Image: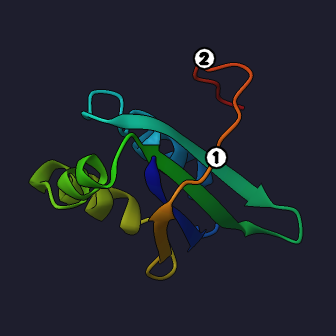
C-alpha cells in the first residue's frame, strides 16, 4: 500500500463545504482504498488527511490525473494555504469496519 498524509488549514466557516467537496473523492478511482480526515483538538481549523492506495503506481496515476487536479483545485480554494504533503509506503493498516462513514 502507498499513500499520503497531509496537513491542511481550512478557512473559517468552510469545513462543511470542504467535507461536501471531498466527500466523493476516490470512490471510482482505481486502486483507492481509503481516505480519513481528522480535525485536531488543539486547533479545529487544522485538518489531517490520510489517504491510501493499493500501490505507488495507482497513487501516482491518480495524483497526476486531470480529474484529480480539478478536485484538488476545488478544495484548495477552501484552505488558507497549500497543504503539507507527506507521501510514503504504508507498512501496515488495521481496519475493523470498512463501511464509509461521515460524522
Residue 64 placement (x, y as % from top left) = 16, 61
Farthest residue, direction front: 91
Residue drawn at the location 64% of the way across and 24% of the way down: 101
Counting residues from the start of the chain, the first of labels 2 and 1 encountered is 1
Residue 81 in view in this figure? yes
Locate residue 65: give its quadrant: bottom left
Report if the CB atoms under discs 2 and 1 are less than 8 Å apart: no
Viewer-proximal residue among 61 and 22 = 61
Locate residue 74: give its quadrant: bottom left
Q: Give the left or right position of residue 7, taking residue 24 as reference.
A: right
Q: Give the left or right position of residue 102, taking residue 32 as reference.
A: right
Q: Give the left or right position of residue 28, taking residue 100 as reference.
A: left
Residue tagged 2 = 99
Residue drawn at the location 38% of the way across and 67% of the way down: 76
Numbered mark located on residue 92 in the image: 1
Residue 13 in view in this figure? no
Dot 2 falls on a residue whose secondary structure is loop
Q: Please, is residue 64 above or below residue 53 in the view? A: below
Judge depth for marks 2 and 1 and give the one in front: 1
Question: How many numbered marks does the figure carry?
Answer: 2
Residue drawn at the location 32% of the way across and 55% of the way down: 56
Q: Give the left or right position of residue 91, taking residue 20 as reference.
A: right
Residue drawn at the location 24% of the way across and 58% of the way down: 60
Mark 1, Cα crowd under 10 Å, few <14 / some 14-19 / many 20+, is few
Farthest residue, direction right: 42
Dot 1 falls on a residue whose secondary structure is loop
Residue 54 placement (x, y as % from top left) = 38, 40
Mark 2, Cα crowd under 10 Å, few <14 / some 14-19 / many 20+, is few
Q: Please, is residue 19 above or below residue 66 in the view? A: above
The image's colour scheme reads: rainbow
What whole-number distance in Å separates the C-alpha atoms at marks 2 and 1? 19 Å
Amino acid at each position: 500500500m502507498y499513500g499520503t498524509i497531509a496537513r491542511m488549514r481550512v478557512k473559517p466557516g468552510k469545513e462543511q463545504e470542504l467535507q461536501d467537496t471531498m466527500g466523493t473523492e476516490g470512490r471510482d478511482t482505481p486502486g483507492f482504498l481509503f481516505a480519513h480526515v481528522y480535525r485536531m483538538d488543539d486547533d479545529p481549523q487544522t485538518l489531517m488527511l490520510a489517504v491510501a492506495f493499493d500501490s505507488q503506481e495507482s497513487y501516482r496515476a491518480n495524483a497526476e490525473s486531470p480529474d484529480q487536479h480539478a478536485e484538488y483545485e476545488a478544495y484548495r480554494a477552501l484552505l488558507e494555504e497549500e497543504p503539507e504533503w507527506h507521501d510514503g509506503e504504508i507498512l501496515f493498516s488495521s481496519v475493523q469496519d470498512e463501511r464509509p462513514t461521515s460524522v
